[in-house]
Image (spheres, rainbow, N blue to C red):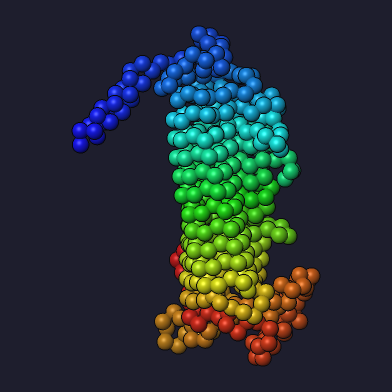
């Protein structure tokens, strides 16, 4: 016990000493310091640097002290199209209130507006990024927060654009309430664990609004993904919670609201998939719950490949989709129960809101289109209707076990 008191004494003493001697340094044309680098050179841990309005062309600014860097009247930090603007090598740094623009482009060095290397407790908030290659780049970091920023890319192609918020080999990040557009990927996570993606809007990105690559045990909640090449891609990952997000207007030949590839032990609940080419495309998925989602106005609501297993699809609404379910084989190791299908034509004699006749949501025509996409030109033709009616009488192509035994008669209030 005595040792604990001694440790607390020294820890508290250090904090008090930092705060007691912390200074505030002002930077600006009418201030003591005219350059941020000049003030950083004499700053100590715990100091606050106030940067007043104006343009600052200081090439690459390296922060290697525990400081609070605050902009007043949104000062502009300009990379002149050649440099990384801010590079952080210290813990406990806060960066707030800047416009950061015109980074350099380098596929080798991956230049960013703000890059954070191997740090803890760094916060980036209320900044605007314009014409940047990578917006915020986080590498080997723990407990960092990216909040309330607006990021805009350089409007290049997939090979000449970086990611809005790029996170690699990090843990316990919070990425909340940012607006991100015109990057390659809006938010990219690789080898990132135990992190939260919450209330962001990611739109008009070339590839994905949000991209997981081997990033386990994370959650993304209440985000908006629209007008992207694809809304979200989750690949080679397990333990992802996907709750209450909006996947809207992600359209194109190979576009998806949500792309899942080789993922397991995850939960997709309370989301809205609207007006996407495919709401969800799932390949190699295992032990996944899909429940209480709205699928409306999509080309395909859910494409589920035959190599998926133990996927439980229940209590979802399917409204005005061209095809509700599609698959590429006859083997079905998944369950469908208690969903509302607007194409269901059964009846409910005992009025318990459960259809008395099971429903098969896969049509013969959708199976043929899966194998030969050019058959879409026959959509809404008499021959496709005739094929589907014939298949219902004499099933031959559609998977026998892909069936909802308890279809709902009324949509759920989702």
| 310 to 42, vertically: above or below | below
**Does any portion of residue 276 appear in the rendered image?**
no
**Picture quarter with the N terminus:** top left
In the image, what residue occupies the spot 55% across and 27% down? 98
The picture places residue 18, in percent across and down from the top left corner, at 36, 21
Q: How many marks?
A: 0
In the image, what residue occupies the spot 43% across and 16% down? 24
* Side (left or right) of 82 relative to 118: right
The picture places residue 162, in percent across and down from the top left corner, at 67, 40
In the image, what residue occupies the spot 54% across and 29% down? 88
Residue reaching furthest to the front: 3
Residue 155 position by quadrant:
top right
* Side (left or right) of 208 relative to 265: right
The picture places residue 58, in percent across and down from the top left corner, at 62, 19
Residue reaching furthest to the bottom: 394
| 386 to 321, vertically: above or below | below
In the image, what residue occupies the spot 63% across and 42% down? 163
Residue reaching furthest to the left: 2
The picture places residue 103, in percent across and down from the top left corner, at 66, 30
């Amino acid at each position: 016990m005595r040792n604990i008191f001694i440790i607390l004494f020294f820890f508290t003493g250090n904090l008090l000493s930092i705060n007691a001697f912390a200074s505030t340094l002002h930077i600006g044309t009418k201030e003591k310091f005219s350059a941020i680098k000049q003030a950083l050179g004499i700053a100590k841990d715990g100091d606050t640097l106030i940067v007043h309005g104006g343009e600052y062309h200081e090439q690459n600014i390296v922060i290697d002290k525990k400081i609070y860097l605050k902009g007043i009247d949104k000062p502009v930090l300009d990379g002149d199209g050649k440099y990384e603007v801010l590079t952080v090598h210290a813990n406990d740094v806060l960066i707030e209130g800047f416009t950061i623009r015109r980074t350099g482009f380098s596929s080798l060095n991956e230049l960013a507006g703000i890059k954070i290397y191997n740090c803890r407790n760094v916060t980036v908030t209320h900044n605007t990024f314009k014409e940047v290659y990578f917006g915020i780049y986080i590498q080997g970091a723990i407990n960092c927060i990216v909040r309330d920023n607006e990021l805009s890319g350089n409007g290049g192609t997939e090979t000449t654009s970086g990611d809005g918020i790029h996170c690699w080999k990090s843990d316990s990040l919070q990425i909340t309430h940012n607006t991100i557009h015109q990057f390659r990927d809006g938010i990219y996570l690789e080898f990132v664990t135990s992190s939260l993606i919450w209330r962001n809007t990611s739109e008009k990105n070339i590839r994905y609004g949000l991209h997981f690559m081997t990033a386990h045990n994370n959650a993304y909640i209440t985000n908006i993904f629209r007008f992207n090449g694809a809304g979200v891609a989750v690949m080679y990952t397990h333990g992802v919670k996907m709750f209450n997000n909006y996947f809207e207007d992600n359209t194109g030949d190979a576009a998806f609201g949500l792309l899942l590839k080789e993922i397991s032990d995850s939960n997709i609940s309370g989301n809205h998939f609207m007006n996407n080419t495919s709401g969800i495309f799932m390949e190699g998925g295992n032990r996944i719950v899909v429940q209480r989602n709205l699928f409306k106005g999509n080309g395909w609501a859910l494409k589920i490949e035959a190599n998926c297993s133990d996927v439980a699809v229940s209590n979802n609404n399917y409204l005005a989709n061209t095809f509700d379910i599609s698959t590429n084989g006859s083997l079905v190791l998944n369950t469908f129960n208690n969903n509302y299908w607007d194409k269901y034509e059964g009846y409910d004699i005992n009025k318990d809101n459960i259809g008395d006749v099971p429903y098969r949501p896969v049509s013969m025509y959708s199976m043929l289109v899966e194998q030969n996409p050019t058959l879409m030109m026959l959509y809404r033709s008499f021959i496709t209707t005739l094929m589907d009616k014939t298949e219902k009488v004499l099933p031959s192509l559609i998977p026998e076990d892909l069936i909802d035994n308890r279809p709902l008669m009324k949509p759920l209030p989702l």
